[in-house]
Amino acid sequence: MHISENILQKTLDAALSTGADFAEVFVEETYSGLTSVKNSELDQALVGELKGAGIRLLYGEETIYVTTNDLTETGLIAAALDAAQSQIRQGIRQPVPLHLQKFDRIHPYGESPWASDKNKKLALLKKIDHLARAYNTAITQTQPTLTEKYQRLQVANSMGLHAQDERAYTRLGIDVYAELKGQKETSHIREGVLGTFEMAEQFDLKTMAQEGARRALALTQAPYAPAGEMPVIVDNGFGGVIFHEACGHGLETTSVAKGTSVFCDKLNTKIANACVTAVDDGTLKSTWGSLTIDDEGLPTQKNILIENGILKSYLVDYLGSLQTGYQRTHSGRRESYKFAPTSRMTNTYIAPGNDSLDEMIRDIDFGLLAKNMGGGSVNPSTGDFNFQVQDAFIIRRGRIEELVKGACLIGRGIDTLGRITKVSNDFKLSIGMCGSVSGQIPTTVGQAQILVSKILVGGRVN
Amino acid sequence: MKEQLNAHVKVQKEQNEQVSHYSADVELVLESGAKAKIEYQKATLKDFNINNWAKAGVAIINDGVRSYSSTEDLSSESILKTFALALSNLDFIKKNRQASSYLQFYPQQNGIAQFADFYFAEEISLQDKKQLAFQIEDLALKADSRIQAVVYSGFIDNKYQMRILNSLGMDQYYRQNAYGVYVAPLAKDNDGHSKMDMNMASVRRFRDIDVAKLTSLAAAKAVGRLGAQSLPSGQYPIVIGKDVTPIFLQMISHCFSAIQVDRNTSLFKDQLHQQIAVSQLNIVDDPFVERGQNSRPFDAEGMPSQKHTLVANGVLKKFITNKEYAAKMGIEHTAHASCRGNGEMDIEPTNLFIEKGSFALPQLLQRHNQLIYITKFVGSFHGGYKESTGDFSLPCEGFWVEEGEIKRPVDQIVVSGNILEVLKKIEALGDCYGELNPTLWGPDLMISSLSVAGK
């Protein structure tokens, strides 16, 4: 799929024909594939294609967005006129002639997913299945799944920008089911890469399988987490979801521009302790949340959001820059052409610090080491956030003790940020999917272990 | 769309011709929709979004295995290319997957309740739609002086249609529409603390949209939460408000699926004809109700829809099935075939509800000297619930009640438990249904006790 500059230009002409200030065309063709195994044999082998265009118009800060699956010249122009006819203003602008931008390829890709060997993919899934089952006879079921996505896109706008990109995503997951002494449990392990299948072949299957099995088994015998406020050490890697939810969404101009984010009007003020430096970096090589260009056609960059506790930047897309006056941070993202872009995260993490994990543990009389997190969510307008702890360890009188399961941690973002008192140097990133107004997108969260001096643990009261 | 698809009938014929060489069968499922969304913010048009979409899914069944491919390009050329892709995948699947003797397509069906498409779309002018969307934010802001902002609000006009064609002669079609309105006002008190709540409504007819009711209720809910505080951790009697009862249905909806039972991932496995809930509880799946957004005249296999009581007097009466799993497991076929976005065949409920009881809310609130009346669950459901065990840990908000009187709002609490235990702890059911959720609903529920974590 490739739409000529001539057609893109004509589409932008049509889009601006009723007085819009800005027009943009986003064209996409995406291949997706899913291969899964159940009962140690092939379960699903599905393929699909997503193909269409989204045409965005801005009249000041008002957004018109129309999608179409008809990528012919006639179809694109018709969609552009549909969008244009929803608003009529004085003063018709002319689009600037398009100029194709060139970008360095940061993220290497191999064979495209529709061409790569299906048998190899199945063999990989069967291998991880076998490794998990072999761990213990109490492993009753596994569901390994390989998902692949190959997106080809073009962005063109009335300011003359024309950019193209190709993005390959490969994600390997395994759900492990265990049953021991009448108790059933599951665990979920995921790895992903901005890359094609041969990069997935480099995943450590043995560690993934055995960790999944170990975790599911251990949880069958674990009691529930306690309930109440207490100090919590949040582990590295996916523990970064605490920042993602408590703070990250509140820094997107999607919320800031409305005036309803709790972080509004707090630039260059202290919002956290000095040990906290938080970054959003879309340039990390082959990392799940990275992009060469954002979905508005601009090269991604590393954005320092919080530096030594001081709020330095929001995440700003084009509309956000118009609404707030802040400089763009090249953070416009969308799930697909079906969504208008908004400011979103990429790879977001709390930078490693200098504190010792052992000291953090020793200083706690009664608390929790939150090891494996589930997902979370936030209301940026109130700052109320939550995320799930799949399993954790009780810390008692400075020592790690029994495994516990199943608790939700809740708080208010701005309060919780102020209670991060220590950050270790053992840093790790983990993959995830983030949902918001512009759809589901791949993101990475990360951190070293952090100590939150007080947070509400929603475990069980006996 | 039905008329537009005559070209696809020809495509289907060509596909039929090709698979006849393999003694295979092929099915083409065509879907399309048009969704318009209008949002205002600070009296300015913030977002006007028209999403016109279409999708063609091609499935081939041969020697007991199924191959599937899909495209969003509905040109004949693209569909035939998609068909070729599905055909090329078939050999790989046959070599690596066990065949199922129960897998097949079906011919044209009789007895389809075509009224269940509930299509009442009207030609509404763009101006009228914009006016309605504007009004929602405007009325919400004026509903109470403590409403400082409307975080989001809008109007949606949604249409959908679907046609199934296959090589056994099936050609079935239906269409649907819905209008949706939603609003989320933000209330602030004098101390600068803010609380947000939301309201939404989904109707089939434009004239049934009641903006005044939508906005006044949303504002009252947001304002009512101001001053909320946490509670000490403990075990408490709980009334689950009818607008949030759906969360418990969401926890168990997949458990009725025959696929989940067969894979040993359903909490209801081995529970057929057993007492799984209190005797007052009845759960019904009904694909024929106008308010239900999952209503449809036939399922994803083209089988005529059926209404079923899944739980009667607390006893699990049946699982929901498609043709394959009904035959495989030797149980009743209930016409609940569904197809996920990626083409995977599944089994899902349509509109699932807990039948209402006989207690008015004030009566429920008086059943214990002290209790918590939960009216909002906060955050991600899937994060707080574990399907494999039924354990949940969910942040929520509501009210502290003493002697039947609401004393103050509460927040920053987490309620935890296990859904299988909750089903047996329901003491009483309310006498009217919640209106917030268009596919899952139920009355207020009095639960004898649940663990609550607080400050």
Image: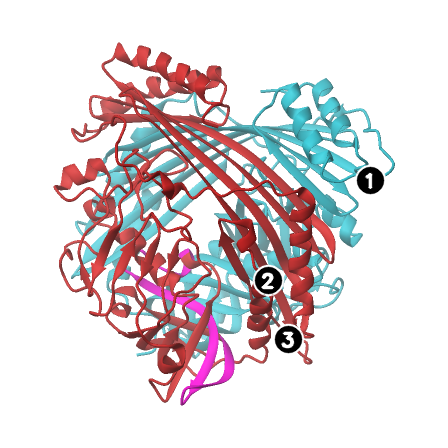
Chain colours: A cyan, B red
* Image quadrant where one finds the C terminus of chain A: bottom left
Residue named by callout 2: B184
Q: Is residue A351 above or below residue A343?
A: below
Mark 3 or 1: the one toward you: 1
Residue at 68 percent across and 76 percent down: it is B192
Q: What amino acid is found at the position of numbered circle 3 in the picture?
A: His
- For label 2, count other residues whose C-alpha is less than 10 Å away and answer few (under 14), some (14-19) or many (20+): many
Q: Is residue B356 above or below residue B98?
A: below
User: In this rendering, do the residues under marks 2 and 1 share a single chain?
Assistant: no
In the image shown, does A302 or B221 lie closer to the viewer? B221
Numbered label attached to residue A89:
1
* Residue A51 position within the rendered picture, expressed as x and y whole percent measured from the top left: 54, 27
| Observer able to see residue B85 | yes
Q: Is residue B368 above or below residue A168?
A: below
Q: Is residue B59 left or right of residue A15?
A: left
Q: Chain of mark 3?
A: B
Tag 2 near tag 3, CB within 8 Å: no
Residue named by callout 3: B193
Q: Main secondary structure of the magenta part?
A: strand
Q: What amino acid is found at the position of numbered circle 2 in the picture?
A: Ala
Tag 2 near tag 1, CB within 8 Å: no
In the image shown, does A288 or B306 lie closer to the viewer? B306
Mark 2 or 1: the one toward you: 1
Residue at 35 percent across and 38 percent down: it is B114
Residue at 29 percent across and 21 percent down: it is B169
Q: Is residue A192 left or right of residue A136?
A: right
Span of residues in magenta: B382-411
Quarter-wise, where is residue B195 in the image? bottom right
- For label 3, count other residues whose C-alpha is less than 10 Å away and answer few (under 14), some (14-19) or many (20+): few
Q: What amino acid is found at the position of numbered circle 1 in the picture?
A: Arg
